Amino acid sequence: MIRIKKTRFVQHTCYSLLSTGRVSSLRSSLFTYEDGRNFAFYNHPEYKPQFLGDKTLKFSNKNLEFQARSACGNNIQCVFDIRTTNKVAIGKATKEATEEYTALIRNTDLQGNGSG
């Protein structure tokens, strides 16, 4: 199996490439819209995603950042999810899931050699 190292460069490069195929007008959109909504309602070309690999996860709400750092400790997935959703409970669930996964991996024989 070939593994591609996830790096900030790869994530940003993929985003840039995908952005070139972005729908740019109502005429090129294949979607139908509910009453009161149109292409312009959903089109936000100024939006730039924040990637998990980014060195600093920027919070606009300092109180939420404090809550995230307190709840998550060093679990970057937890911090990322709180930053993305603005919901501490989701971050805590992520932290719990990653801790369970890590424990499971530690206790599983991944090599298939019967030890562990």
Image: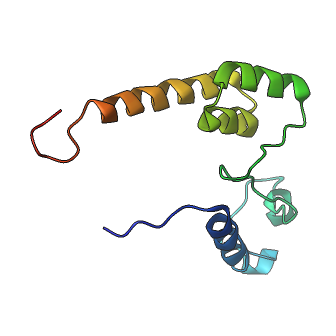
Q: Nearer the viewer, residue 20 or 57?
A: 57
- Picture quadrant where residue 73 is located: top right
Decide if residue 92 is on the left or right side of residue 1: right
- Picture quadrant where residue 45 is located: bottom right
Q: Which residue appears at 68% of the width and 64% of the height? A: 32
Number of numbered discs: 0
In the rendering, at what x and y percent does residue 90 appear? 62, 27
- Quadrant occupied by the N terminus: bottom left
Q: Residue furthest front?
A: 115
Q: Which residue appears at 67% of the width and 73% of the height? A: 13
- Quadrant occupied by the C terminus: top left
- Picture quadrant where residue 102 is located: top left
Above or below, 40 against 17 in this view is above
Decide if residue 84 is on the left or right side of residue 109: right
Above or below, 42 against 26 in this view is above
In the rendering, at what x and y percent does residue 33 appear? 73, 59
In the rendering, at what x and y percent does residue 67 appear? 77, 20
Decide if residue 35 is on the left or right side of residue 4: right
Q: Which residue appears at 71% of the width and 35% of the height? A: 85
In the rendering, at what x and y percent does residue 72 appear? 65, 25
Q: Nearer the viewer, residue 25 or 17?
A: 17
Decide if residue 86 is on the left or right side of residue 72: right
Instruction: Identify the colour scheme used.
Output: rainbow
Above or below, 75 against 88 in this view is below
Q: Which residue appears at 71% of the width and 26% of the height? A: 87
